[in-house]
Image (cartoon, rainbow, N blue to C red):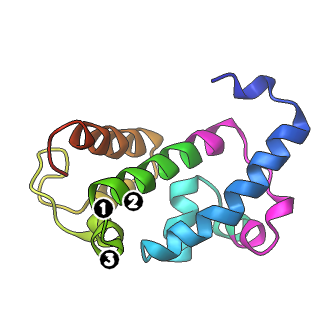
Amino acid sequence: MALPQLPIEKRQHMSAAAMRTYPNIANDWGLKEQEAALLLGVPESTYRRWRKQPTTARLDVNQLERMSLILGIYKALQILLPRADAADSWLRRPNRNPLFAGQSPLDRLRSGLVQDLYVVRQHLDTARGGGHA
């Protein structure tokens, strides 16, 4: 994805759309504001400002990548676990898969590292292909 070459207007539009959607996902997942900011890779004050005024959001390439991964995780959970309560609580439930070592996927995401978003996304994509989350 060649995000750095995106025209500024396109990036602004994508940022505003992301910040209209992401707080709803964070709410569905029961994330605290601090956790939502951490997953997005921004300070809490920035997350709060963008949440209140999505049109002011200016996500950089890293934050757009994180948003893409978060949206992918959300979508995969909705497909794998069609009951909203099951999909939304999956991140908080302890998981015996070696990737999570008995901890919840959210515990892994709390590292704040983008590669942990990749791991969770890849795990769910693999589960969609035939395994189980």
Say which residue appears at 55% left-offset and 43% top-offset. Answer: 68
Question: Residue 88: where, in percent of width, then height?
Answer: 36, 70
Which residue is tagged 1? 107
Reading the image, the residue beneath label 2 is: 110
Question: Given this view, does label 1 or label 3 mark the residue nearer the observer?
Answer: 3
Measure the C-alpha gap from mark 1 to mark 2.
5 Å
Q: Is residue 31 visible?
A: no
Q: Tell me the CA gap for discs 3 and 2.
A: 21 Å
Q: Quadrant of residue 86?
A: bottom left
Find residue 127 and report its image quarter: top left
Q: Amino acid at mark 2?
A: Arg
Disc 2, SS: loop
Q: Are dots 3 and 2 in contact, CB under 8 Å?
A: no
- Specify the amino acid type for callout 3: Asp
Total numbered labels placed on residues in the image? 3
Prevailing secondary structure class for the magenta stretch in the rendered image: helix
On residue 85, the disc is 3
Apparent side of residue 5 relative to residue 24 in the rendered image (left or right): right
Relative side of 116 to 12, left or right: left
Q: Given the image, on which type of amino acid does mark 1 rest?
A: Asp
Residue 22, position in %: x, y?
Answer: 60, 63
Whether residues under marks 1 and 2 lie with C-beta atoms below 8 angstroms apart, the answer is yes
Say whether residue 16 is left or right of residue 24: right
Where does the magenta region start and end?
Answer: 48-65
Q: Going by the image, does 102 lie left or right of 73?
A: left
- Pick whichever, 30 or 108, lies toward us: 30
Residue at 12 percent across and 59 percent down: it is: 102
Q: Nearer the viewer, residue 87 or 55?
A: 87
Q: Nearer the viewer, residue 74 or 53?
A: 74
Residue 51 located within the stretch drawn in magenta: yes
Please state which of residues 59 and 127 is positioned toward the viewer in this rendering. Answer: 127
Query: Does 63 appear in magenta?
Result: yes
